[in-house]
Structures are given as structure tokens and as C-alpha cells.
Amino acid sequence: MILAEFRVDQPILRRTLDHVPGMTVTWERSDRIGGDRTQFLVWAEGGDFEAFEAALADDPTVTPPRQTMNFVSRRLYVLELTEEGRQTCIYPLMVDEGGLVREMTATSDGWRLRVALPDRRALTHLHRFCRESGIDFDLRRLYVRADETGVSAYGLSPKQRDLLLQAFEAGYFEVPRKITLSELADEFGVSNQALSERLRRGVRTLIAQTLANTVETSRGE
């Protein structure tokens, strides 16, 4: 199992959000309603609702919207993809690949997704679909679940993986650093030397399994 965070510039709602750049759309649910028809619910907030609804009516990727809930700061809309929208929608492919959408939002900068996928093959299929459809695909983060042996796909032990992730999230690799080695050691309850050695081994393993491995593969090809 992997968890991928990425941005795609798929055309769905692109024209609408370009007209109302302050609006944020958050996906709630998608349903297939017969044949190839796909209906989905989205929350909209942060912008001019009248301008948003007017832009939706002219958007070539969706049919005219149906509003179902109206709150002070956000509204819920039911939309259906047009033929043009269906051709570039990655949601059905994610479902077919066994993916589970954890989060999907859109602004004038594109769609940002957080998706759980069964393996890298599924992610490769998503990337290939976007490339062949002329859709920009920008992978931001990739989390790989450890296998039954306790070793992750990058050869890291669970302790090394936890340390690297916590050090990254705490700002240890920032310039300047937001947390010191001593502070990290205190959080893990080990000495500075023990943490430093674990950190160096983890970084070395990660480089060996990614950058160095890529270099060797390229040379072999």
C-alpha cells in the first residue's frame, strides 16, 4: 500500500476556477449513474458564488449545476461530467486501480489529491494516463507502507523510516534547522550519538536505494 500526494492540471472545472480564482472546490463523492455517466458532489467556498455558478453554466466539462445545500460560507453542488469532462477525468481510473481518495481539492492552480493506492504499478498507470492525455502530473509526496518483513520499499527499517519522517516534518533538514539533533534525540529517548548514527544509516540507505540505484540502472541501460 502506498499513499500518494500529487497535483494534476486536469481540465475539469478549469475554466470555472480561472474565472473565480478565489474559490476552492472540495470533492465530496462521485457516483456512476448509468453507462459512462458520472455525477459528483463538491463543496465550494472562499469566492463569489454568483460568479462561480455563472461560470459553471458555461463550463464545457460539466452540466449546469444543482445546488443542494447553502451555508453562509460554503455551498454543496451536484455536477455531472460532460463527454469532454469524462475523457480527462482520472477518478474512474483511480477506482479501477483499487485506489481510495482521501482528499481532492481544486483551485485555479489545479487539482490536489491524496490517494491510497495498492502499489506503484497503479501510480504508474495514473501517471501514464495523465501524460497521454496532456495533463500535467506533479508528484509531491509518496509514502510507502512497510511489508511483512518490517522493511520498507526503500530498504529502511521501521525505526529509520520513523526517524527520517519525523526529522523532515520537524524541520531538521531545513536551512536553517528548526530543530536540533539534541532535541530530536530527546523526542526519541536516545543519546545524540545513537540518533546521529541511526540518521546517517537511514540517509545512506535511502540514497543507495533511490539516487544511487537510479544511477546504476541508467548506466546499465
Image: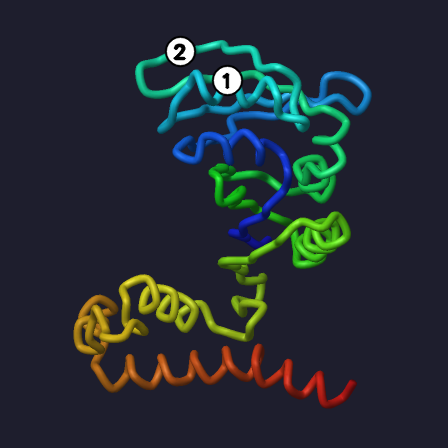
Circles 2 and 1, Cβ within 8 Å, touching? The answer is no
Q: Amino acid at mark 1?
A: Glu
Residue 221 picture quarter: bottom right
Q: Is residue 132 left or right of residue 200?
A: right
Identify the secondary structure beneath mark 2.
Answer: strand
Q: Nearer the viewer, residue 173 or 68?
A: 68
Classify 113 as above or below 1.
above
Q: Nearer the viewer, residue 179 or 193?
A: 179
Image coordinates for residue 126, horizontal then vertical, percent? 69, 50
Residue shown at 56%/56% (left/top)? 138
Q: Which residue is mark 2?
A: 70
Task: Find the residue positioned furthest to the right.
Answer: 35
Q: Is residue 122 left or right of residue 49?
A: right
Image coordinates for residue 124, horizontal then vertical, percent? 70, 57
Question: Which label sits on residue 106?
Answer: none
Residue shown at 78%/17% (left/top)? 34
Classify 204 as above or below 141.
below
Residue shown at 45%/21% (left/top)? 51
Q: Nearer the viewer, residue 74 or 57?
A: 57
* Tally of numbered discs: 2
Q: Amino acid at mark 2?
A: Asn
Q: Nearer the viewer, mark 2 or mark 1?
A: 1
Q: Is residue 146 left or right of residue 70?
A: right
**Model colouring:** rainbow
Q: Which residue is mark 1?
A: 53
Determine crowd level at label 2: few under 14, some 14-19, many 20+ residues with C-alpha closer than 10 A. Answer: few
Residue shown at 49%/58% (left/top)? 141
Distance of label 2 from label 1 (alpha carbons): 13 Å
Classify 214 as above or below 84.
below
